[in-house]
Image: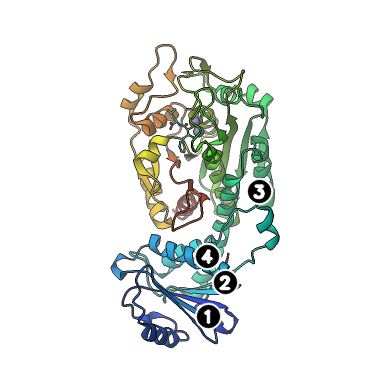
Amino acid sequence: MNVEISLEPKLSRIDHLFVLLTENADPGDLPSAIEPMVADAVERSRFAGRADESITILADEPRKLTIAGLGKRDELSFRRVRAALYSIGKVAHKQRDERIAIAFPYLLPDLDATATARLLAGAIAEIDYKYDNFMTQKKDEKRPVIEATLIPPAGLDKRAARAVQAEAAAIADGIRTVRDLGNAPSNVLTPTRLAERAQEVAKAIGIKCTVYGLREIERMKMGGLIAVNRGSAEEPRFIVMEYSPRRAKKHVALVGKGITFDSGGISIKPAEKMEEMKFDMCGAAAVIGTIEAAAKLAIPVKITGIIPSTDNLPSGSAYKPGEIITMMNGKTVEIVNTDAEGRMILGDALHYASKLKPDHLIDFATLTGACVVALGSEAAGLFANDDELAQKLIESGERAGERLWRMPAWDEYKDLIRSEWADMKNSGGRWGGASTAAVFLKEFVDCPSWAHLDIAGTAYMDETPREAKGATGAGVRVTIEFLESLSRS
Ligand code: BES
Ligand code: MN
Ligand code: ZN
C-alpha cells in the first residue's frame, strides 16, 4: 500500500475514511475538517470504542466513514493498533476502495508525534501484503493498489511528515523483498535463484554483489557449507553484497542463514509442518531486504551482506552423523545431528565476515526450535559478546516495534557441545538448545562486537490478527533503526 502523510487531506478524493478511536474517546484531537462528522456519527450510533467494535456510514465527502474501536485508552499499544490496521486493509480490499485515509488522533505510549507516525506509516505500508504469485486465478483479477493517507496525531510538522513517508516507503520495499523471498517455494527459490535475486536487488540499488559457486567455495575451504550441500542436487552459493556509501564512518557486516529447504538431512525431520522449512532462508532474506532499505534511505554506514546458501537434504552423498568436518577457520566439528545445519554454514560465513574486520557483526538465522519454545513469536532471541551492542539493538527494536530478548551465550554452554573426537559437536541436544547453538557460532566469530538474532519464531507466522500468514520481514526494521542510530552517533 502506498502511504502519504497529510494533516489536511482532500476529503473529496477519498473513498473511505477510517478513524481509530479508543473507549470513551474525545474525538476532539482530530483535524477540524473531520471532527464534527466523527462526533456526530459517534453520538448517533452510541459507538463506545471497544476493540472489536466498528461502524460504517455512507457520507458525501468522503463517500464512506468507518470508525473502529481500539479499546481502553490506557491499554493502547502499537500491537493493538497494528491489528486494527490489518483489518482496515482487509475491509478496504473487500470494498474495492482505491483511496483511503486513516486517522489516528493519539500518541502511542512513551512516543512523540514523529515516532508514532513512523510506526503507523510503516505498518500501513505493509498491511495489505499478500503472496499470490502462484494463484492462477487471483492474479488475473489484479488487486488494485490502494493509496492510503495517514492523518497523524497533531504535532507532526510538514518536513517530518515527508521524511517519515519516505522512510516508510523504503522500509516497506525491503520488507516486501524479504516476504516474497521467504514465501517463495523451495523448488523455485533454490540457492542459485536466491543469488540471482540478490544480484537483481543489488543492481536496482546500484551496489556490488559477488556470487561464489561450488568451485570457489571449495577453494575457500568452507567445509561447513560444502558438507551440508553434499546431499543436495542443487549447487550451493555464497553471496556477498557491498553497500559502501562515501560518507560512511562505520562498517557493519550482516550474515544471514540461507537454507532454502531444511529437511533435516539424514537426521530427517517428521513430516508434519516440514513444508514450513522453506522459510529457513529468512535470515538471508532479511540481509538482502535490510541492505535494500538502507541503500534507498542512503544511510551513511558501510554494510557488507554475507549469505551462505544451500538446501539440506538426505541422499547417498549427504553428510552423516559421525562425520568430522573441518571448517573454513580450521576447527573440526563432529556431526551428531545433520539437522543442526544452520550453524555449519554460518560458522564459515561468520569466519569469512570476521576477516573483513567490521565494527559490528550481526547474524540473522532461523536457527533453533528451542528459541521458539522459549519466546514463541513475540520476540527474536538475541545473543551477543558485546553488552553495548546488545543494548543498542534492544532499544532499536523497541523503537521499531520489533522486540528482541537477550539470552545467554555463556562459555559454560560449551560443555554441552564438547566432543570426544573433534573440537566440538554440532549439537548439544535439547536443553538450552538456543544457547548451545549460539556458543557454537561464537567459535567462528573473531569480532569484539557480534550479535546473533535467532529469528526462528518471528520470521514467519500462521495468520495472526496482526499480519498475513507466511514470512514477516523480521530483522529489517530493528536493523535499519540500529543503522540509523549508528549514523547519528
Ligand atoms: N531450521 C531449524 C530450526 C527451526 C525449527 C526453525 C523450527 C523454525 C522452526 C534448524 O536447522 C534445526 O533444525 N534446528 C534443530 C537443532 C537441533 C538438531 C540441535 C532444532 O531446533 O531442533
Ligand atoms: Mn535443521
Ligand atoms: Zn535449519
Q: How is the image coloured?
A: rainbow
Q: CA distance from mark 3 to mark 2?
A: 34 Å
- Reading the image, the residue beneath label 2 is 95
SS label for mark 2: loop
Check whether the beta carbons of the residues at disc 1 and disc 2 lie within 8 A of each other.
yes
Residue at 45%, 58% in the rendered image: 466
Mark whose residue sits in front, 3 or 1: 1
Q: Amino acid at mark 4?
A: Lys
The label on residue 90 is 4
Please name the amino acid that badge 3 sits on: Val
Residue 303, image x and y in percent? 55, 44
In the structure shown, which secondary structural element does the residue marked by tag 3 occupy?
helix
Badge 1: few (under 14), some or many (20 or more) residues near its Cα, within 10 Å? some
User: Is the residue under label 1 in contact with that under label 3 (CB below 8 Å)?
Assistant: no
Q: Which residue is mark 1?
A: 64
Write the residue at 48% across / 31% down. Answer: 270
Which residue type does callout 1 highlight? Answer: Lys
Quarter of the picture containing the N terminus is bottom right
Q: Is residue 402 left or right of residue 169?
A: left
Quadrant in the picture for residue 96: bottom right
Q: Earlier in the sequence, mark 1 or mark 4?
A: 1
Q: Is residue 384 visible?
A: no
CA gap, disc 3 and disc 4: 29 Å
Residue 231: image location, x then y, percent: 60, 23
Query: Residue lying farthest top?
Result: 421
